[in-house]
Amino acid sequence: MTVRELREALEQYQDDAEVRIAIQPHYPLQSTVAGVVSDREIDALPEGADEDEETVVWIVEEDQVRDDPYAPRAVFDAV
């Protein structure tokens, strides 16, 4: 998924809705988002890449949600 595709996917949702990450479809867990960082910002550009452009943007996991660490399995079927 590209940044453009992610923006477009999020356009339909309210700006103040919390974003969580669902991981491991066979044992679905959920986590909160700590932040976003690019490979350029962490000096991890691939060999020969343009230093002014990002090739990968990382959504960084903060922690598993404590009240209920499990994500609904249906979220994986809905994508």
Image (cartoon, grey):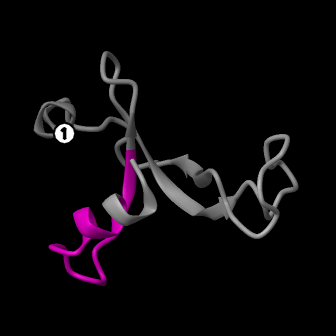
Residue 26: which quarter of the image?
Answer: top left
Residue under numbered circle 1:
75
The residue furthest bottom is 15
Identified at 30% across, 83% down, the residue is 16
Range shown magenta:
6-21
As shown in the figure, which amino acid type bears the numbered disc 1?
Val
Q: Secondary structure at mark 1?
A: helix
Assess disc 1: are there few (<14), some (14-19) or many (≥20) residues with their C-alpha within 10 Å of its C-alpha: few
- Foreground residue, 38 or 71? 38
Name the residue nearer the viewer: 23 or 69.
23
**Is residue 11 a member of the stretch shown in magenta?**
yes
Q: Quadrant of residue 28?
A: top left
35 left or right, relative to 15 = right
> Residue at position x 68%, y 60% from top?
38
- Relative horizontal placement of residue 37, taking residue 76 as reference (left or right): right
Q: Residue at x 38, y 55 (%)?
A: 20
Position of residue 72 in the picture relative to residue 54 (left or right) = left
- Tally the numbered discs: 1
Relative image position of residue 8 (x, y in whole percent): 26, 68
**Residue shown at 24%/62% (left/top)?**
9
Q: Is residue 20 magenta?
A: yes
Residue 79 x/y as whole percent? 18, 40
Q: Is residue 38 above or below residue 78?
A: below
Along the viewing direction, whichever of 44 and 61 lies nearer the viewer: 44
Position of residue 24 measured from the top left corner of the image (x, y, whole percent): 39, 25
